[in-house]
Amino acid sequence: MKLFSRWVESYYRKSLGIFLHLIFVTYLFTPAALNAGVLTMPSSSLNVSLGGSVTLSASAEGLADSTVSWSIVSGGGSIDAATGVYTAPEVMPVGGLAVVCATSNADPTRSGCVTIRLSPALALGGLGEPIDLPGVSEGVIVADMNGDGRPDLVRRTSLYEASSVVGGLNVMINDPEGWMSHSTVAAADLLQFAVGDLDDDGDMDVLGVGVSFDPSLASTLQVYLNDGTGRLTAQPESSPVGGRLINPALADFNGDGLTDVAVCNLTEGHVGVIYNDGTDLFDPLFKLISVLSHGAGNGLETADLNGDGRPDLVAGDNFSRKLSVVLNAGEGAWEAAKTYEVGEAPYPSVGDFTGDGWADVVMTGGDGSLYLLANTADFTGTLTPSPAIMTLPADVRNLKPVHVDTDGTLDLVALAGNSASMMLRGTEGGFEGPAWLFYGSISGAGIADFDGDGRPDIVASGLNEGKTYILPGLESGTYGFSVHPAMRCVNLGRKEQFSWRALNPQTGPPRSYEVSWNAG
């Protein structure tokens, strides 16, 4: 028995010695953990679209050789060892994440990794194909309808059911997993709509303009309230008013904190304002106050032109061929209109195009001529018209200002009614281009960063097919689809095609993400 006990004791001592030796060897030869590893990023998360790319950089501080080798641990994709450019896979991996690591060439025990969140390509329409959305798109507005910080779509649609056509308002939620049809409400006579917080609850509601196409051409306004998640509920329709109402523009015009509406009565030829009294009912028959004696059939815009903090009105009228500015005097009062006769038929858009911090106006003149009306910046709201800057297709009607690069100058996306739409690069005192974007009739368009990569994308509904496309913004400050390089202009339902011409790439610094660690 004693002999057996000694054998057991000797066995455990030897075993413990071997076990301790293994622990010691493992400690010696296992790569050391990252010492105070620091991942420096300009934002809290790194988001790359499927098929997109981002530049990563890393260095081993305190070593003679600070270079690193790159490896992809999970998620797929590829990385250029020389430049550190990571290109995301075309297909979403399980979990939607990719992990990329850098290892010091001088000391392989030193390494650091970055986790990359991948965005679905569905948000950008795939390989040049339209987004798969329900119904036929007849107009689109971009707004965050559920408060998650991502831009969603509000569409006027036609839904074909049996032998009838049912009009509606459809909300598409921009979910990380793809577009989700969240809400559709009936809106049979809806002609136009605008988005804003109409009931002062912090979320985006919809104001619709309905038109009867009988001889009376009577119009109504209807509010669709948002429950905060993007689901809309129709409120009672307003009293009908004689004449065709168009181009609603939303802003707090009298400074009471509630969103009001300015609208043009095209038939009667004037612009009026309906003040929000908190009842969620905008009734043009009883509440519309005329502020301009001619119409705004070509566009009605709001902006603070004289620097007093109140939204003013810019109206383009086809019949009088006038561009008018109506300054807001506050508390429901308006000044007399300042009128500019520029071009044949003004189609205006507002933005700071001269970079002086004041709102200017750009417009097409009905014949394709593009004009800049610069703000005199003297607190009077006066504009100085320029000669025609360039000539665009005659049916360019919709100008959308947007920053597509990092030069600080406001650019333009010019949307044509039935021909090629294009992008114009802003320059000092004007624009250059164009770069063709898509071809076909446009029923609605908007600009927003749909995939979260920091670059504005363009959404457009094609009137011929009723389908919706999104053109992703590229890092060079251009737009494109993943289609054949010679045909980068997307066809929105027309047989003809245009070749796409790239603009000069921007010269600003590239996006980069740096991984660094201590020498110890």
Image (cartoon, rainbow, N blue to C red):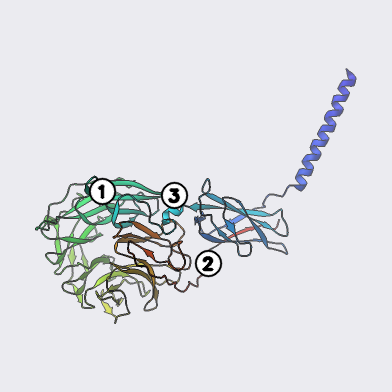
Mark nearest the camera among 3 and 2 is: 3
- The amino acid pointed to by label 2 is Pro
Image spot of residue 240 (x, y percent): 12, 54
Along the polypeptide, which appears first: circle 2 or circle 1? Answer: 1
Drawn side of residue 376 relative to residue 320, left or right = right
How packed mark 3 is, by other alpha carbons closer than 10 Å (few <14, some 14-19, many 20 or more), is some
Residue visible at 43% across and 72% down in the picture? 501
Whether 440 is drawn above or below 198: the answer is below
- Secondary structure at numbered mark 2: loop
The label number, if any, that marks residue 331 in the structure image:
none
Res 24 quadrant in image: top right
Mark 1 highlights which residue?
A: 160
The label number, if any, that marks residue 510 in the structure image:
2
- The amino acid pointed to by label 1 is Tyr
Image spot of residue 246 (x, y percent): 19, 61
**Residue lying farthest top?**
1
- Secondary structure at numbered mark 1: strand
- The amino acid pointed to by label 3 is Pro
Drawn side of residue 19 relative to residue 354, left or right = right
Residue visible at 61% across and 65% down in the picture? 83
Whether 175 is drawn above or below 389: the answer is above
**Residue lying farthest front?**
495
Mark 3 highlights which residue?
A: 176
Image spot of residue 245 (x, y percent): 17, 60
- Decide which of 281, 167 is in the foreground and name it: 167
Q: Quadrant of the N terminus?
A: top right
Along the polypeptide, which appears first: circle 1 or circle 3? Answer: 1
Res 379 quadrant in image: bottom left
Mark nearest the camera among 1 and 3 is: 1
- Decide which of 175, 164 is in the foreground and name it: 164
